[in-house]
Amino acid sequence: MSGANLGPDWERLPDGTAYRQAARVVVFGDDGRVLLARGHDADQPERSWYFTIGGGIEPGESPRQAAVRELAEEAGLWVDPQVLVGPVLTRQARFDFFAETVRQDEVFFLAHVPAGSAVSTDGWTAVERGFMDEVCWWEAGDLAQVTREIFPAQLPALVRQWRSGWDGTVIHLGLQDERTTIASPATTRQASSASEEGHHR
């Protein structure tokens, strides 16, 4: 049985937890900037966070194909699956999504696109429109100063590492718990969010 309200790519584990496999992509412009999405949980609109483009792997898809499809849906950017770099990272994430705790096994790729590539949200699905707020370019050096949460938390350091190329090492982060109850103090530092807007427009 798929997870109620979550979409057809989710299933229920024996303990009732919604689960899916997902592919994500860290997108770099030729100018070194990185593309991130910002979203919120349905029952906590005051808490939003930045994350990489990506989503569930559909039946019959490879992780690479899913990453390319999600990049087109969520950002309006098209790349050849064969030019994706990686996978560069894997992790298992437990987080809040549509007012419940879910688990997602993720594989990450890298993509490079021309500097200044315009993004589009016209391809967002109904589910994505329910929790996604924006997709925007960031200067890689600015990510360390972001006061909102970023997932995975290691992303600012990884972006600095990957911006100059990938050394072939696949990083395995293991299980990361990102639920509200155990989230970092950054969850409360929302007051300065307005100042962030100037960094990524």
Image (cartoon, helix red, strand yellow):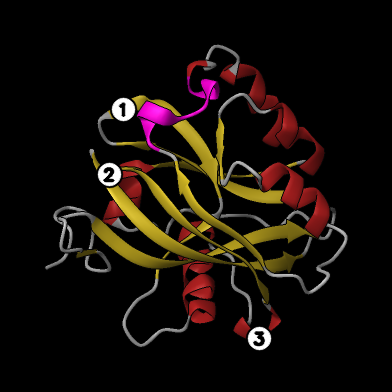
Boundaries of the magenta span: 179-187
Q: Nearer the viewer, residue 27 or 115?
A: 27
Q: CA distance from mark 2 to mark 1?
A: 13 Å
Residue corresponding to mark 1: 44
Callout 2–callout 1 Cβ contact below 8 Å: no
Q: Which disc number belongs to residue 181?
A: none
Say if residue 174 shows up in the picture: yes
Which amino acid type corresponds to the residue marked 1 in the rendered image?
Gln
Which amino acid type corresponds to the residue marked 3 in the rendered image?
Gln
Q: Earlier in the sequence, mark 2 or mark 1?
A: 1
Residue corresponding to mark 2: 101
Q: Is residue 128 magenta?
A: no
Callout 3–callout 1 Cβ contact below 8 Å: no
Q: Residues within 10 Å of mark 3 (few under 14, many from 20)?
A: few
From the viewer's perspective, is the residue at label 2 or at label 1 nearer?
A: 2
Residue shown at the point (65%, 55%) measured from the top left: 118
Residue corresponding to mark 3: 82
